Amino acid sequence: DLELDEIPECPKVQNLTVTSVSESSIGLSWTGMNDSYVARYRTDSDTGWSYQTTMTDTIEIYGLLSNTTYTVEIAPNCEEITEDMYRQITVITGCASTNAPYFIDFETESMMHCWTIAQEGIIEDSYYGNMHFPALETSSSNAYSGTRYLEIGAQAGYTAVFVAPKMNQDIENLRIKFYTREPQSFLSANVLGTLQVGVVTSAMDVASFVPVATVPVSGTNYTLNTVDFDQSGLSGGDY
């Protein structure tokens, strides 16, 4: 099919992109041909839209709820704005710092949004293709409890870095407890290596990682591991 018609006076914005996300704000940018734009946003539970205008092709929306899915729509600010003029994007805000005691059994996938994959571990396989870790898997026979478990692995040359939510308490007052075991699969020969527990000053700053303990992973039965941070020499509200 082919259609030829007039260029609209108020063309729809293009290339709508998320530029920043925090626990209470969202930043967006786009390309357009207008002098001003209208942004509207809401959560799934909101009955109406909240509106904001901007004279540029970027916007920062503040005062949002943490760890919440928002639908955001951008339209050119014309004399008449119709529904089909909006361009839509869905964004999940960041997570607020949390308090200890903190517990997760990996059964609720939405809770994993508050964890950060700072760096992926990769295993290259000629049959299965590239596999990316960490990965949240489902198997009652492999999980310590329930049906969900976290699988972490990386072949030589790759390092998987997974960051838990930031705690409000000083790191020197905390400890972490978790269960580990070898994977019961063909991955065993590729994955087994070093598992380190440590602290970062920023969730996405892999270079800031400070190791606190190295945890041995061996055997196909789950082992309880406990790492105390009081002897680490670290302090403050790091991750």
Image: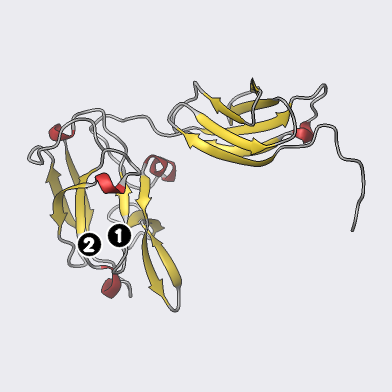
Front residue of 92/140: it is 92
For residue 188, which quarter of the picture? Answer: bottom left
In the depicted structure, whether residue 172 falls above or below residue 80: below
Residue at the image point whose x is 27% and y is 29% from the top = 99
Image coloring type: secondary structure
Q: Which mark is residue 159?
A: 1
Q: Residue at x 39, y 40 (%)?
A: 111
Q: Is residue 206 left or right of residue 173?
A: right
176 vs 50, nearest the viewer: 50
Position of residue 69 relative to residue 61, above or below, is below
Question: At which x and y percent is residue 90?
Answer: 58, 38
Question: Mark 1 falls on what kind of element?
Answer: loop
Image location (x, y in percent) of residue 233: 9, 38
What label does residue 181 carry, if any?
2
Residue type, mark 2 in image: Arg
Q: Which residue is at a point 32% across and 50% down the rendered structure image?
A: 162
| Quadrant the N terminus occupies | bottom right
What secondary structure is marked by label 2? loop
Tag 1: amino acid: Thr
Q: Quadrant of residue 16?
A: top right
- Measured as percent of width and height from the top left, residue 6 is found at 91, 41
Instruction: Indicate the quadrant containing the C terminus: top left, top right, bottom left or bottom right.
Output: top left
Quick check: 50 left or right of 67?
Answer: right
Please provide percent x and percent y for residue 230. 9, 37
Image position of 76 with respect to 191: above or below: above
* Disc 2 from disc 1: Cα separation: 18 Å
